[in-house]
Image (tube, helix red, strand yellow):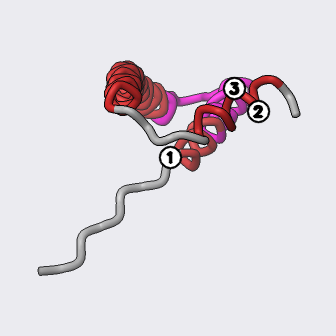
Amino acid sequence: MRFFELKWFKSRSRLATKHDLKKLVRQIMETQTELTAQLTEIAVKVEKVGVETRTLLTKIEALQDALENQGNVTPELQAAADALAVQVEIVDNLVPDEPTPPPA
């Protein structure tokens, strides 16, 4: 039996004291506080990604509109625009659309 297994076994072979329970509650609360901070940090990052994505999509739409208003478009420009549209579709497919609410 390894040392930490023995230590775990010894710690579980007696009834928990009030001190043990307080220590456990303190550890749980510290863990929850850490998780809360981590989740808040992730939420901020996700919001930032959303804002950046909306900005990027607006710029892409403006570029597509400008491309459509051009008279003679070179094949290279059209290929670049098509490749960008494909990448936008790939990114869009990574995030599922919000379901439409049922009619009232």
Position in image of residue 18 (x %, y %): 32, 31
| Residue 26 located within the stretch drawn in magenta | no
The N terminus, quarter of image: top right
Residue at (59% x, 32% y) in the render: 11
* Mark 2 or 3, nearer chain start: 2
Can residue 102 be seen here? The reply is yes
Q: Tag 1, which secondary structure?
A: loop
Tell me the amino acid under the disc marked 3: Thr
Please indicate whether residue 24 sits to the left or right of residue 3 in the image: left
Question: Mark number for residue 66?
Answer: none
Q: Which amino acid does the dot numbered 1 rest on?
A: Val
Q: Which numbered dot is residue 95?
A: 1
Residue 74: mark: 3
* Labels 2 and 1: the sequence-earlier one: 2
Frontmost residue, 12 versus 89: 12
Between disc 2 and disc 3, the foreground one is 2
CA gap between label 3 and label 1 equals 33 Å
Magenta residues, as a range?
67-86
Q: How many marks?
A: 3
Tag 2's secondary structure? helix
Can you name the residue that lies furthest to the left here?
104
